[in-house]
Amino acid sequence: MDPHDAAPRFAQLLCPSQPLDGALEMGWLDQALGGDPSAVVWHGTGSLVAPLSYQQHSRLDAVSAAFAGRGWPVRLRRSGGGVVPQGPGILNLSLAYACAGAAGTQAQTVYQHLCAALASALGALGIVAHTRAVEGSFCDGRFNLAVTHDGITRKIAGTAQYWKRAGGVQAVLAHALLLLDADPRQLSGLCSSFEAELGSARRYDPNAMTSVAQAWQQAHPGERVPADLGQQFTHHLALALGQESVQPVPF
């Protein structure tokens, strides 16, 4: 995708009918290399996901086994960043599409497109979100999405990307993880515990994260959070990505 080109076009926005473990993302990337872009909203099974760089921790295998025993298996991903949770109340958006130009010159454009789509969908719910780093949040980065309420800024979504080249074509997998109605404090504590058991110095501020449900309540004081908040968000996300609807599919 050239910075001067139109936003990538997706044949449809898919919403899997069962939780995924993230392994299918590499398949979507391979399809994109073949000219078949994907836009998928999905939720994962309960787990912790860390970048391959965490293999530097000598206690990774032992700590991973311990967390698996507590119902939080650990898997590694190819993109960078830090540890993130998956599970109920967390939505993921994966966009896979071919791009022209070097990855180093396109990364910011890819992030901007991803964040703009998410911010548009949140805006349709009355939630004003902007891109910025949020100190103390898990997997912090410059292209987080954050919301500000009463002068306090909290992260609501994180983003990442991974590139692959084959046969003279390159494609990007742009990914966002968004807390829908999961408990931000509980998840931040879980990630901090993981870091502590690894022997890492990283800790996460339980007040640095928020969810769509919490932000919705702040934007609509005195009103009850809609039971179909996730469906509403996904509908608006489809429109932001140029789709008229979401097609649920089994994976």
Image (tube, rainbow, N blue to C red):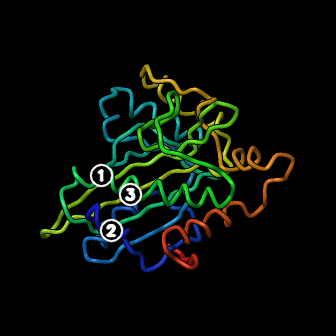
Residue plotted at (87% across, 47% down) = 222
Residue 97 tag number = 2
In the depicted structure, whether residue 74 falls above or below residue 240? above
Q: Amino acid at mark 2?
A: Tyr
Neighbour tally class for label 1: few under 14, some 14-19, many 20 plus, Cα within 10 Å: some
Q: How many marks?
A: 3
- In which quadrant is the N terminus drawn? bottom left
Task: Please provide percent x and percent y for residue 45.
Answer: 56, 54
Neighbour tally class for label 2: few under 14, some 14-19, many 20 plus, Cα within 10 Å: many
In the depicted structure, whether residue 107 falls above or below residue 206? below
Gap between marks 1 and 3, in whole Å?
Answer: 9 Å
Neighbour tally class for label 3: few under 14, some 14-19, many 20 plus, Cα within 10 Å: many
Gap between marks 3 and 2, in whole Å?
Answer: 9 Å
Q: Amino acid at mark 3?
A: Ala
Return the residue at label 1: 107
Side of 235 relative to 136 (left or right): right
Whether residue 25 can be seen here? yes
Disc 1 and disc 2 in contact, CB within 8 angstroms: no
Mark 2, secondary structure of its residue: strand
Q: Amino acid at mark 1?
A: Ala
Q: What is the quadrant of residue 43 in the picture?
A: bottom right
Q: Nearer the viewer, mark 1 or mark 3?
A: 1
Return the residue at label 3: 174
Give the mark, 1 or 3, whose residue is nearer the N terminus.
1
Residue plotted at (28% across, 64% down) = 4
Gap between marks 1 and 2, in whole Å?
Answer: 13 Å
Residue plotted at (33% across, 68% down) = 97
